[in-house]
Amino acid sequence: MVTIFIEHLGCIRVRSRHLSVAVATEKVRCVQVRPGDKGHSYSSVFGGCMDGNVESISVRDPYIRARHQLHNFVRFCELAVRNCRRLKAICLITGREPQTESLQASSLKELEESLKDYSVVLTVEYSDTLHDREIRFSNGWIVRMGRGLDYFQKSKGQFTIGCNDFDLRPCHETTIEIYHRLNMKSVNKT
């Protein structure tokens, strides 16, 4: 009886190791953005993660509240719609702020309606405890950002270079880490 138990325990340990490897991630790239750096638009940061295999995206960012943060989220969604032809769902998990709650709700509702024109469902969840910023793509890419989507400096004016082209917009200091989940099939072969 003890021998059978020990053999069973050994099998569980081996399977556990295989599972932990199967869900492991590999850091592909780490971008250190210094204050004032340019060339870090959403297209240049997220473009490699957004492809025809993406069906859903989960955005965890506690600060999609103020007008400029909401505009940033719209820009991100536009890029996703443009690059991810099989995209069906975007889930935003964010926080609320009493001073901007009505602006936030109406803006996200308008975006939700707009995304329906592209057969994309936007769901919004609120969390008072969310802190970490992370975007997960259904094709296995994971992006972690110290400042979330709000890493651009304020434009110096309405008619200045970088006002609309975010590759030309100076950035705040932040770290962007890009990971990819390892392929389960390749892990099971070893």
Image (tube, grey):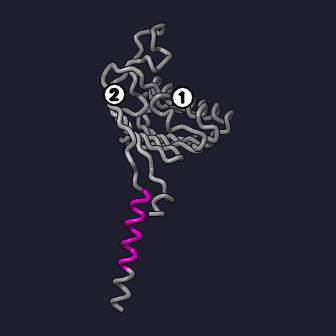
How many labels, in total?
2
Marks 1 & 2, CB-CB < 8 Å contact: no
Report how far apart the C-alphas of labels 1 and 2 lie in the structure: 22 Å
Q: Amino acid at mark 1?
A: Val
Residue 76 placed where, x, y %?
52, 31
Q: Is residue 139 above or below residue 187?
A: above
Q: Name above or below for residue 78 compared with residue 24.
A: above
Secondary structure state at the residue bearing disc 1: helix
Does the stretch in magenta take in 138? no
What's the magenta bit mostly, secondary-structure-wise? helix
- Asked where in the image residue 95 lies, by quadrant, the reply is top left
Q: Residue furthest top?
A: 159
Residue indicated by mark 2: 33
- The residue carrying pointer 1 sits among few (fewer than 14), some (14 to 19) or many (20 or more) residues within 10 Å by Cα, namely some
Residue 104 appears in view = yes
Give the magenta part as a residue range: 9-23
Residue 17's spot in the image, x, y percent? 37, 66
Query: At 42% across and 18% down in the image, what residue appears?
Result: 169
Residue 83: x %, y % from top left: 59, 33
Give the residue pinned by disc 1.
74
